[in-house]
Image (cartoon, rainbow, N blue to C red):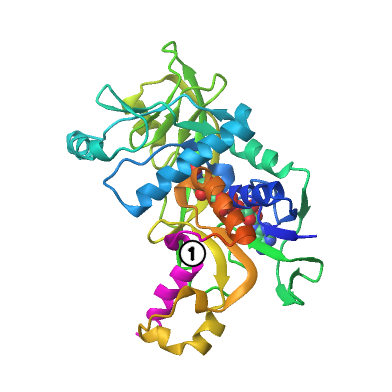
Amino acid sequence: MKTCIVIGAGIAGAATAFELAEAGLDVLVLESKEVCGGGSAAAGAFLSPKISKPSAYKTYLNTALAYSLAFYAKHFPSLLQKGGLLKLPLDDVDRKRLESYEPYIDFPWEKRQNGYFFPDAGIIAPDRLCRALLAHKRIKLRKHHTRTLTFQNDRWIVDNLYDAKYLVLATGTDDEPLPLPYLRTKRIGGYRYDIRFDDDRQLSHNIHKEVSLSLFNENRVILGATHIREKIDLHEAAKGDRYCLVERAQIFYPMQNLKILRHYLGYRRFTFDYFPIVGEAVDARATLEVYPYIRTGAKVPHEKYRYFKGLYLHTALGSRGFVFAPWNARLLRSHILKQKAIPHPLLPATRFMKWARQQSR
Ligand SMILES: Cc1cc2nc3c(=O)[nH]c(=O)nc-3n(C[C@H](O)[C@H](O)[C@H](O)COP(=O)(O)OP(=O)(O)OC[C@H]3O[C@@H](n4cnc5c(N)ncnc54)[C@H](O)[C@@H]3O)c2cc1C
């Protein structure tokens, strides 16, 4: 029987476990804290497209968004609120910039006020979604902090307790429990609020200008989120609204008697080009032993690299974890079980190559 262990029960781990379980694998998910207890707990989670000039990243993002919206609507319709998003320009310069991108908008849209309305955009409930994904009958969940991984007889062994043919690391901002020096990422903190206020305008969509506001939940409105690069106490920052989320939202959507019901905080992990990391993990030491001249720029095809066989990564989802994860999980499932190629920018091998070439400097 084919089995898989997924480490981490945030959206990356939960979506991966679900896909592999759907494909018929028995999946064990190991989580050191709680389901959706890492960065995923802080997410809004807004599902919105990118407006920009054409780029590989934009194509990837909007493809992932279309897939994820359809995935949520199919499997978890009660958790998805699809009321649309109104994206407003920041100022005149931004308005002109957005206008120049109009020919490249590849998501259904219409002009509204001086912004862009995307009727298909939405929001999803992060915690309930992760739990619903993990409720699949082929998935087992255990509270366990993974410390060591060993590979024996074609199986991955976790802390001498659990073993499986495949292993997926979806550990968010925590380091992977084995050396992967080429995963160069940064960690950005943030907070967001659940708020309530008096309103008779009866709007039912999201609005984004500098910050995002969801207006289609009767009981609470979600206001998010900050991008904090400094090393500060996030809890204190959220308590005092150090980054003026409320003030910035009031500018484009004035709210009477606003009350903050709760704050959420967490960290997201980014790569420097914003593409997530998805695919089989390269064994850097073994590859450089066989092909030391990769360091000086020699071209060695990815297929020749040495891999940690059966060990995969799904991480660095940045600020769009709930947009990317279902699509990445689908790519990973097709790759693991049908050897379908994963797009190059996502691959650990691409990260390894860039890192290795800098080792000789
Ligand atoms: C303030 C804020 C607002 C955001 N808003 C949005 C939004 O509107 N839309 C959107 O799409 N995204 C949003 N994001 C981004 C999104 O939350 C992240 O991209 C996503 O949650 C990352 O998911 P993950 O599963 O990779 O990591 P995490 O959610 O951090 O999950 C990783 C899990 O792995 C576990 N783990 C780590 N190491 C081990 C180990 N050794 N053993 C066992 N378990 C381990 C951790 O305990 C954790 O639960 C936001 C993020 C923040 C911080």
Q: Nearer the viewer, residue 280 or 303?
A: 303
The N terminus sits in image quarter:
bottom right
* Residue 245 at x, y percent in the picture: 40, 36
The C terminus sits in image quarter:
bottom left
Q: Which quadrant of the figure has residue 280?
A: bottom right
* Residue 356 at x, y percent in the picture: 43, 79
Asked if the magenta segment contains residue 355, the reply would be: yes
Q: Nearer the viewer, residue 118 or 229?
A: 118
- Is residue 32 visible in the rendered structure shown here? yes
* Residue 353 at x, y percent in the picture: 43, 75
Q: Nearer the viewer, residue 268 or 97?
A: 97
Judge from the rendering whether residue 311 lies leftward or rightward of residue 4; answer left or right. Answer: left
Vertically, is 27 above or below 303? above
Q: Which residues are magenta?
A: 341-361
Vertically, is 12 above or below 199? below
Count residues near mark 1 (Cα–Cα under 10 Å), then give few for <14, some for 14-19, many for 20+: many
Q: Nearer the viewer, residue 264 or 92?
A: 92
Residue type at mark 1: give it: Leu
Residue bearing the label numbered 1:
347
- Is residue 191 visible in the rendered structure shown here? no
Asked if the magenta segment contains residue 148, the reply would be: no
* Residue 169 at x, y percent in the picture: 62, 62
Q: Which quadrant of the figure has residue 312?
A: bottom right
Vertically, is 59 above or below 311? above
Vertically, is 193 above or below 339? above
